[in-house]
Amino acid sequence: MAPTVTQDAVLSDAQIADLAQQLRVDSVRAADAAGSGHPTSSMSAAELIAVLLARHLHYDFRHPELPGNDHLIFSKGHASPLLYAAYKAAGAISDDELLTFRKLGSRLEGHPTPKIPWVDVATGSLGQGLPIGVGVALAGARLDHLPYRTWVLCGDSELAEGSVWEAFEHAGMEGLDNLTVMIDVNRLGQRGPTRHGWDLDAYARRIRAFGWHTIEIDGHDVQAVDEAMTAARDNRGAPTAIIARTRKGRGVAAVEDKEGKHGKPLPDAEEAIRELGGMRSLRVHVQEPEQAAEPKRPADDPDARLPRYDKGGSVATRTAFGEALAAFGGLRGDIVALDGEVGDSTKAGLFGEAHPERYIECYIAEQELIGTAVGLGVRGWTPYASTFAAFLTRAHDFLRMAAVSRSDLNVVGTHAGVAIGEDGPSQMALEDLAMTRSLHGSTVLYPCDANQTVQLITAMAERTGISYLRATRGNTPVIYGPGDAFPIGGSKVLRSGPDDQVTLIGAGVTVHEALAAADMLAEEGVKARVIDLYSIKPVDAKTLREAAEATGRFVTVEDHHPEGGLADAVLESFGNGHPMPLLTRLAVHSMPGSATPREQLDAAGIGATAIAAAARKLAAA
C-alpha cells in the first residue's frame, strides 16, 4: 500500500498520477463489491478528475450549501464509481461506504442522485448534464454574479444526443466563460466504437462552431490536463471544452480499449488491482472557495400587485399567466422566467419586459429550456419555463430526470388541445396531462379563467417537485372573482342541488362547455351538477366521492386524448371500497384537422351539445 498523504499536502504531478490510479482501483473495487457497474467508463477519466480535485476544483465538502462552491456534474452518470472514489479521496465518504455501492439503502446509487449532498442533479440519462450545467453557469454569470465555476464531465457517446448541441449553442451565445466541459473521448460506447472514435478534431470543429474555446489533449497526461484546466479558468468571453483522448479501462490489459467490457465488473478484480499498482490511501486537499459571497438577488417589491379581472369579462388564461408572472416577479426577486422563443404567444414575454435581467431566452430548444431551468433551480432560483404545451413532449425525459433530481420546477404549457383551432394537430397538446401526471410527485393544474390562473401561478412557487399548468389560447369567460381561493388539490362545484341526476366534470375550456350543457339540460328538466376540476393532480377525491354518492352518474369531458387525462384522474379517486359511478368519458378520440375552435370542440364531441346528449342518456339509464 502506498503511503498516506495528509489532507493538507499539495500533490505533485507524480502524486496526482498516483491518485488517478487510486481512483481506478477504487472504481474497480466498488463495482466488484456490487457485482455490477461501469468501472471501465470510470477508469478512462481518472486523470481528468484527479487533476480537477487536486488543483482546480474549489469546494467545501463540509458545507455543500455555500454559494461560492464550484459545481461538478457527471453527465456520464454511469461513471459513478469514479465520482464516489473521488469523494473518498476528498475525505467526504469512508472506504466502508464506498463498498456499499449499488446496495439496498446506500446513497451511492448506480447513477448519482441528490441523495448525496455534493450531487446537484441526477444524471445517467445521457445528454442532460451539459444542458443543466449551462443553467448552473448562467445563474453564476448573469444572476448570482458569483465567481464559481461549473465543470461537466461528458462521455463521447452522449455527444450524439441533440440536447448536447442545444447546450453548446446556448452556452456559446451567452459567452459562459465560467463553464468547462471535459469530454472523455475513450472511443468505445456500449456496443462498440463511437461515431468519431478518437478523431478529436471532429469534435473540436463542431464545438468551435458554436463559439467555444477548445483544447485537445492526451487525457492521461497529468501535465496536459492541468494546463488545459488552467487555460479554461483563464479564458474569457467563451466557454471551454477540454477534449481528452483516453482509453476505456485504462491500466488493465484485460479490458483496456476492448469491446464488450462496458457496464461489467472486471473479470478478476484482485489481478486488476495488482496491475494498477495496488491499494493506495491518498487524501486530496480540495481548495475551498476563495470567498463565501452571497448571490446578488433582486429585492422583493411589496408594492407590486397581482392582476385582477372583472367577472363577466373574457380573458385568455395564457394572457393571465403572462400578466400574473410579470407581477409575481416584482413580488419575489427569486422568480426567473425561461422561454422557448414563443414568449409573444405564451405571454411569458411580459415578464421579460418587466424583468429583462431574469428572462432567459432558450429559443426553439425545449430540452435546453428544461435543462437550463433545472440548473437555475440548483442555485436556488424559482424557475418558470414555458412554451407551447405540445412541444414539451420533446423534453419529457428532462422532466422525468428532474423528478429524479428532486427539482422544484414550474412548467407552463399554452395553446393546448383542439381549442387552439385552425393550426391543426401538430400544434395541439393532447397528451400533456398524461405526460405530466405520470411524473413522480408532480402537480398538474388546468385553470378555466383568468383569476383562477393568477392564484394557481403563484401557488406553484410554494410546491415541491414539478408543477405543470395548462393554459388555453383563446379567450374564456371570467367566472370567478379575484378574491376567490383555489387551493391545489381542490375543485369548484359550480352548479349543484339536492336532486342532481348527473355530474358534469370538466377542466379548462371544457368547464364552460359543461356549464352551457347544464343550462340546456335544465330547460329539459334534467338537473346536472357541474364540477371544475382545476387540480388534476392531486385531485379532489372528497368532492368527487360526494358527487358520486349524490348522483351516481358522471360525464367527464376533456380537451385531451382519453388516455391518462382528466377521466383517469377522476377514476383513480374510486376503489378501495368507494363505489364507482356510472361514467361516460368524452375526450378527443379522433385525429383533428384544421377548423375553428368552435368546430373543433364540436367535431371532437366535447362541446356543450355533445355533453348534454351524453348526460341525457346517462340520466335515463
Image: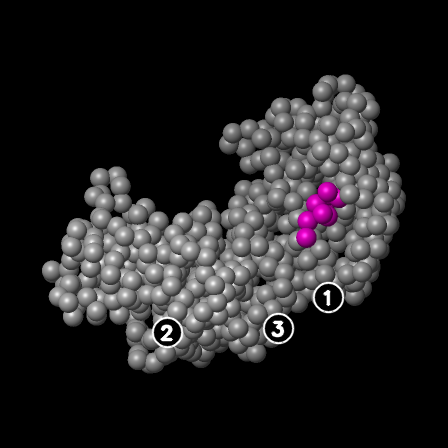
Q: How is the image coloured?
A: one colour
Which three-letter amino acid code belongs to the residue tagged 2? Thr
The foreground one among 595 and 302 is: 595
Earlier sequence position, callout 3 versus callout 1: 1
Q: Is residue 531 left or right of residue 211?
A: left
Viewport quadrant of the N terminus: top right
Residue 17 versus residue 527 in the image, above or below: above
* Residue occupied by mark 3: 357
Q: Secondary structure at mark 1?
A: helix
Residue 51 versus residue 351 in the image, above or below: above
The foreground one among 383 and 508 is: 508
Mark 3 or mark 2, whichever is nearer to me: 2
Boundaries of the magenta span: 154-162
* Residue occupied by mark 2: 476
* Residue occupied by mark 1: 173
Percent of width and height locating residue 148: 69, 58
What distance separates the C-alpha of mark 3 from that of mark 2? 32 Å
Mark 1 or mark 2, whichever is nearer to me: 2
Earlier sequence position, callout 3 versus callout 2: 3
Q: Secondary structure at mark 2?
A: strand
Structural crowding at the residue carrying mark 2, measured as other residues with C-alpha within 10 Å and reported as few (<14), some (14–19) or many (≥20): many
Which three-letter amino acid code belongs to the residue tagged 3? Glu
Whether residue 356 is visible, yes or no, is yes
Structural crowding at the residue carrying mark 3, measured as other residues with C-alpha within 10 Å and reported as few (<14), some (14–19) or many (≥20): few
Percent of width and height locating residue 255: 78, 26
